[in-house]
Image: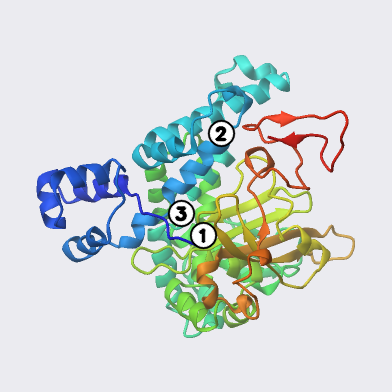
Amino acid sequence: MASQKLYAGAKLREQRLKVGSTQKDFASRLGVSLPYLNQMENNNRPVSTTVVLALASEFGMDVTELSSGDSERLASDMNEVLTDPLFAGLMPALADVRLTASNAPGLARAFIALHQGYRQAQERLTSLDEALGREDARPTPSPWEEVRDFFHYCDNYIDAVDRAAEHFAARAQVPADIRAVAIEALASFGLTVSFTEMDALRLLEPERGILHISTRAHPQTQTFQLLLQVALTQNNTLLEATLDLARFHSPAARDIAKIGLANYFAGAALLPYGLFQARAQACHHDLEVLAQHFGASIEQVAHRLSTLQRPGAKGLPFFFVRVDQAGTITKRHSATRLQFARFGGACPLWNVHRAFETPGQFLRQLAETPDGVRYISIARDISKSSGRYGAPMRRFAIALGCEVRHASQLIYADGLDLSRDTAFEPIGISCRICARKDCHQRAVPPLERNLVVDPDRRDVLPYRVD
């Protein structure tokens, strides 16, 4: 497949403004003409290899940031929003959507936020919510959505928190010692850890100075909860400063985000960036090897792989998703061009759904999205017991993958025929924005396509996509 041209006008402008240079001086240092730079900044021309090299040599720029995926995420989110029936007949060309995401990311985010507000208002009307007239019923994004988008547009990587967690993890001589290190750190703040038989995973009694950790939880979960408390106790100032910068719209969103940041710290301390990345590369990203080495769960390892986006030291660009048995996405992140549906479930043709049928096994899938990009994906079910008889079993499935061009660095690609076109299964993002005409698993028609209904013919679907 032909490589895509690199359009990064917003990133070029950002770098130029960062160094306080005029367009003329910036063009001179890059070795291009002023008109050529102007065209690149407006995405009328792709960024050339010469310019990429000059950015690295002249300004020390991490050139991987030129294709960080921000515009792809925004374009995907905008495209899904535009399939709302509200915009019927107004759907712009995909090229225009991508141009807006690249050239005016602030406007794109404002548009998405506006649509979220519209949806909130419509949902309240539909449910006859009498609180519509109250001050707190104004159509703003829900706290959960706001926090989800915060991590989404941070590329699921929070540098200050990640480095603080890595610094804390350095106290452990070997990964297995991190549990004892966490207990010792909490003791220095006057907290005694008590392993208690209880339903809650973690319970803090601040007035008694006791932190209870459930004996019913798996050891990996216990360690994670200890590290989460370290984040809330020892690193509270850092978390609060990060929240100040985020400027959430409500106290509820801030509270949810604080727990999210504490969770982030715990995962980054359990799987410290440098050590984890090196080990992942050495074992070709074998999730079981990594889980055993660091005393972590398969889900923790898979999620951490998707966060290795530190500038200048990026890992493979993975996507990660977790779904429940109804197909609802409960966790999602993508450092690839693949973006998940913001509303609804994942494509039913994706192997993550079949993982429930084969508990304890990894499923491999070669897939191709409607834009022609090919991926390798692995999926596995994740069952979570409550640790006692009669307690409900929580069941999820996770999927982790990357573009097939990185397959040589994955142990899961061994033995797969990557040269055969028919080996790649067609998948989409969401039925309502998927352009495929012949999908046998389609749940609803695509909103941007015309439908043809033939009363004299019935195929798998009761209509034909024109």
Residue in the image at 49% along x and 38% along y: 94
- In the image, residue 212 lies at what x, y percent? 66, 64
Which type of secondary structure does the marked residue at label 1 adopt? helix
Structural crowding at the residue carrying mark 2, measured as other residues with C-alpha within 10 Å and reported as few (<14), some (14–19) or many (≥20): many
Residue in the image at 26% along x and 49% along y: 12
- In this rendering, does residue 253 appear at all? yes
The residue labelled by disc 3 is 155
The residue labelled by disc 2 is 81
- In this rendering, does residue 252 appear at all? no
Q: Amino acid at mark 2?
A: Val
- Of circles 3 and 1, the one toward us is 3
Whether residue 292 sits left or right of residue 386 in the image: it is: left
- Asked where in the image residue 162 lies, by quadrant, the reply is bottom left
Tell me the CA gap for discs 2 and 3: 20 Å
Instruction: Please state, as top left, top right, bottom left or bottom right, where the C terminus lies in the image.
Output: top right
The residue labelled by disc 1 is 264
Residue in the image at 62% along x and 32% along y: 448
| Placement of 152 over or under 456, stated as above or below | below
Circle nearer the N terminus (2, 1): 2
Q: Amino acid at mark 1?
A: Tyr
- In the image, residue 228 lies at what x, y percent? 55, 62
- Asked where in the image residue 461 lies, by quadrant, the reply is top right
